[in-house]
Every structure is written in structure tokens, then in C-alpha cells.
Image (cartoon, helix red, strand yellow):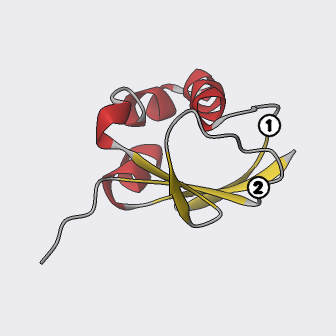
Amino acid sequence: MQLDVLYFAWVRERIGVAKEQVSTTAVSVADLVKELSAREERYAVAFQDMSVVRVAVDQILVPLDAPIGGAKEVAFFPPMTGG
């Protein structure tokens, strides 16, 4: 499956790109995170504490165990704050 993967704020800074197209066999967001983390250290560093990273699949906030089958886009970002 091909996915657009987007990174925002400090997640983007740690990984070094804002967007990339990824070929994956992941079934869930957690599987995708494992695959990405195994790629290079920069991904492992960005995803080392997933309690401080939020995820959206096709622009809908989801938990880590959410399925990604049929998704076009997965985005990773820090928690949003009000203001």
C-alpha cells in the first residue's frame, strides 16, 4: 500500500522532511510506526515516546491501534494546545 505520511512541528524537525510517500505492509498505525522506526535512527528518535505524538488518518484523529487499510494519508504531530 502507498501512503502519504506527513510530519508536523518537532516531529518534522527530527525526521527532516515534512511529507513523504511510503510503501508499507502495515495494518495499523502502530505497525507503521514500527516500520518507520526501523528505517533510520531519526525516525526511532521521533517516535520513541508515542504518548507525546498524535496521529490522524485521512485527517481524523485516531489511536495507535487504528487500522490504516485503504487510507491515503497518515499525519504525525505533537498535541495541540489552545490559545
The residue sitting at the bottom extreme is 83
Direction from residue 28 to residue 14 in the image, left or right = left
Residue at 67% x, 34% y: name it: 28
How far across and how far down the image is residue 7, in percent?
49, 56
Q: Is residue 10 above or below residue 68?
A: below
Tag 2: amino acid: Ala
> Label 1, label 2: how many angstroms apart (C-alpha)?
11 Å
> Could you tell me which residue is drawn at 12 percent across and 78 percent down?
83
Task: Name the element at disc 1.
Answer: loop
Q: Secondary structure at mark 2?
A: loop
Question: Label 2 belongs to which residue?
Answer: 71
Give the quadrant of residue 79.
bottom left
Instruction: Give the residue drawn at x 49%, y 41%.
Output: 63
Foreground residue among 59 and 9: 59
Drawn side of residue 9 relative to residue 40, left or right: left
- The answer to whether residue 5 is left or right of residue 76 is right
Q: Examine the image and state in which quarter residue 69 appears.
A: top right
Q: Which residue is mark 1?
A: 24
Work out whether residue 17 can be spotted. no
The residue that appears at 57% across and 67% down in the rendered structure is: 59
Closer to the camera in the image, 39 or 78: 78
Is tag 1's residue or tag 2's residue first in the polypeptide sequence?
1
Q: Amino acid at mark 1?
A: Thr
- Neighbor class of circle 2 (other Cα within 10 Å; few <14, some 14-19, many 20+) is few
Where does residue 55 sit, x and y in percent of width and height? 48, 50
Other residues around mark 1 within 10 Å, as few (<14) / some (14–19) / many (≥20): few
Residue 48's label in the rendered image is none
User: Nearer the viewer's eye, disc 1 or disc 2?
Assistant: 2
